[in-house]
Amino acid sequence: MTDTSPHLSEGPVLLEITEGIATLTLNRPEQANGMNLALMKALHEAAMRCHRAPNLRVVRLRGAGKNFCAGGDVREFAQQGDGIGDYMREVTAWLQAAVGVLIRLDAIVITEVQGFAAGGGGLGLVCASDIVIAGESAKFLAGATRVAMVPDAGASVILPRLVGFRRAMEILVSNRGIPSEEALAIGLITRRVPDAELASTAEAMAKEVAQGAPLALANMKRLLWNGLGVETVLPEEARTQSLLCGTEDAAEGLRAVIEKRTPHFTGR
């Protein structure tokens, strides 16, 4: 039987829709909401349910537990052995598809960030959001080149437009953690609030936005995102990630993260 309910009450992504506001929660808190295949498929399904939901005004995107999303689940990636290339290609394809849906939703996407927002699942989703509210202790990390891969989720085009080309280049090359104070100053996030006020601030903003003119907001969002041309970049990101994820350097990068050491890259 086909599930016609808009809600998802269990699994790696939760979804609840009430009075025109969808709360979409990444739900792998013990893995810091690490991105794996199951989570990416569930995120795409949740985004599509939002797309089909009538009179939806706002999507409130959040992560359960201490972190919004600490990036890819590198331990699960490493367990794939020789199949890592095919596995990563599928994970990336679902991530890109989910981001494409979120960007094209009529609803405004408000993301709340606590702890780490890293990699395609973390920083990528932050970049693909319309409004981002972060707690004071939040940190942002690119992380892709650290494991010999490239930015995805549209970040290769969105991040430079948010923070500028030179700063984006430095963020992606260095893979340093960016504290919330700096993230606000450079335009990566919309608002910075005390950690204890994160959820209430996001809820209040969601309710405020939901009172706006829906057709005007939806078309404004479409015009702004059209100006970035993200959807033309998503396939190229996926193709490049597909080429890199099966390399020796990518495998070494994943091992180094797990073993908490500096990687040794050979260009193979």
Image (cartoon, helix red, strand yellow):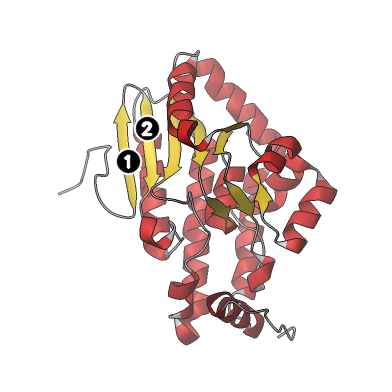
Percent of width and height locating residue 143 = 64, 63
How far is mark 2 from mark 1, CA to CA?
7 Å
Would you place residue 62 above or below residue 146 in this image? Answer: above
The residue lying at 33 percent from left, 55 percent from top is: 12
Q: Which mark is residue 188?
A: none
Q: Nearer the viewer, residue 231 or 200?
A: 200
Q: Amino acid at mark 2?
A: Ala
Percent of width and height locating residue 18 = 30, 26
Q: Is residue 158 left or right of residue 41?
A: right
Q: Residue furthest right?
A: 166
Q: Counting residues from the N terminus, which is met first, the one under dot 2 or under dot 1? A: 1
Q: Is residue 169 left or right of residue 42?
A: right
Crowdedness near tag 1: few (<14), some (14–19) or many (≥20) residues, C-alpha within 10 Å = many
Question: Quick check: can you spot residue 134?
Answer: yes
Q: Secondary structure at mark 2?
A: strand
Crowdedness near tag 2: few (<14), some (14–19) or many (≥20) residues, C-alpha within 10 Å = many
Percent of width and height locating residue 252 = 62, 83
The residue lying at 50 percent from left, 33 percent from top is: 109
Question: Quick check: can you spot residue 107?
Answer: no
Check disc 1 and report the residue beneath it: 15
Percent of width and height locating residue 62 = 44, 42
Q: Nearer the viewer, residue 217 or 75?
A: 75
Q: Which mark is residue 22?
A: 2
Is the C-beta separation of discs 2 and 1 under 8 Å? yes
